[in-house]
Each structure stands twice: as structure tokens, then as C-alpha cells.
Image (spheres, rainbow, N blue to C red):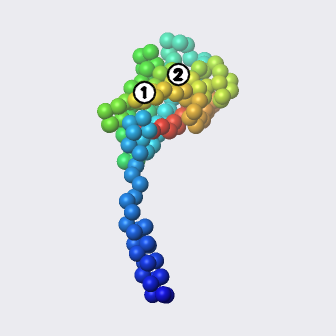
Amino acid sequence: MYIKNIILSGLFAGVALSAPAPTKHTSPEKRADSCQAHIYIDASNGAALPQHATWKYNVDVTGPSGLLGHWDGTNPANTFVKVPSGKNMDLWITGYPSRQKKANSDQKGDLNLEYNSRKWSSNQCEFLRKEPAPSNGWRWQFDWWCKYDC
């Protein structure tokens, strides 16, 4: 009887180990791959005259395989940025932070992002702001780190 139990236990263990593994969720609406956009904006301070104000953008999109897309430029037209992701879909960013707002929470949601059919506010992103000071040339510096499914 003891040997019979050992044989049956071995058969059950073999069947359990050879069971098919669960597959990745492949719905186009929800993919397992996670991407991150790092949006950095360097802006001249409020003392600059409007005709001399600059907004320097630097956007990197990374995914599981590394850098997927990059965009940089100064004073983008209509504050509209399209970052190629290398997957035949682009990350679209509109908006810019106001130099007049005082609190981080006021500026955190100043951007709108869109990827595929999904749209969201930069309120959902991690945010860091550095105010004008001698150490950064008296410029505003803004960073957003936004994660999304790609």
C-alpha cells in the first residue's frame, strides 16, 4: 500500500508540474509592458520679458527594452509635443507649467498626456520642481515621471 501511494503521488506531481503556464494578457487595451516618460522642462524665470522667455523641453520614453523615444526642443509650437515610441504609437504631451504658480500641487497637473486611446493628466505622475536660484542660473526646472502601459 505504501508503494502504491508513492507512485500515485509521483503521478499527481508530474501532472501538476506539466500543466500549461498562464499566458500574458494580450488585450490591446491593457498590456503587461510598462513604459515611463521623463519630462524635463527648463524655463526662464518670471523676470524675463515674454519675447525673451524660453521653454526647453527634454522628453525620454523608456520601456522594458530601454529607450523607446526621445524629443527635445525650445518653445514648441502651441506647447504640443509628439514623442515617437518606436511601437507605431506616439506619446502626445500638451501644456506647460506656469511660472506664476507658487505651490508644487498647482503645477503638478499642468500637462496632459495621451497614448493610444488613453488620456490622463500629469497629476498622476511623480513631480519635482526647482525654483530659480543662483545654482541653476535663475531658471525654473520641472520634472515629471509618468508611468503608463504601452
Q: Is residue 40 left or right of residue 19?
A: right
For this orientation, the residue located farthest to the bottom is 2
Q: Which residue is mark 2?
A: 96
For this orientation, the residue located farthest to the front is 1
Q: Please name whichever residue, 22 or 104, is drawn nearer the observer in this view of the structure.
A: 22
Report if residue 109 is visible in the image. Answer: yes
Q: Which residue is mark 1?
A: 117
- Tag 2's secondary structure? loop
Q: Is residue 129 left or right of residue 90?
A: right
Q: Residues within 10 Å of mark 1 (few under 14, many from 20)?
A: few
- Tag 1's secondary structure? loop
- The image quarter containing residue 136 is top right
Task: Report x, y in % for residue 147.
Answer: 50, 38
Q: Which mark is residue 57?
A: none
User: Residue drawn 39% across and 69% down?
Assistant: 15
Task: Report x, y in % for residue 128.
Answer: 60, 35
> How far apart are labels 2 and 1 at the CA level?
22 Å
Q: Amino acid at mark 2?
A: Tyr
Relative to 139, say whether 4 is above or below: below
User: Residue drawn 36% across and 35% down?
Assistant: 85
User: Residue drawn 40% across and 75% down?
Assistant: 11
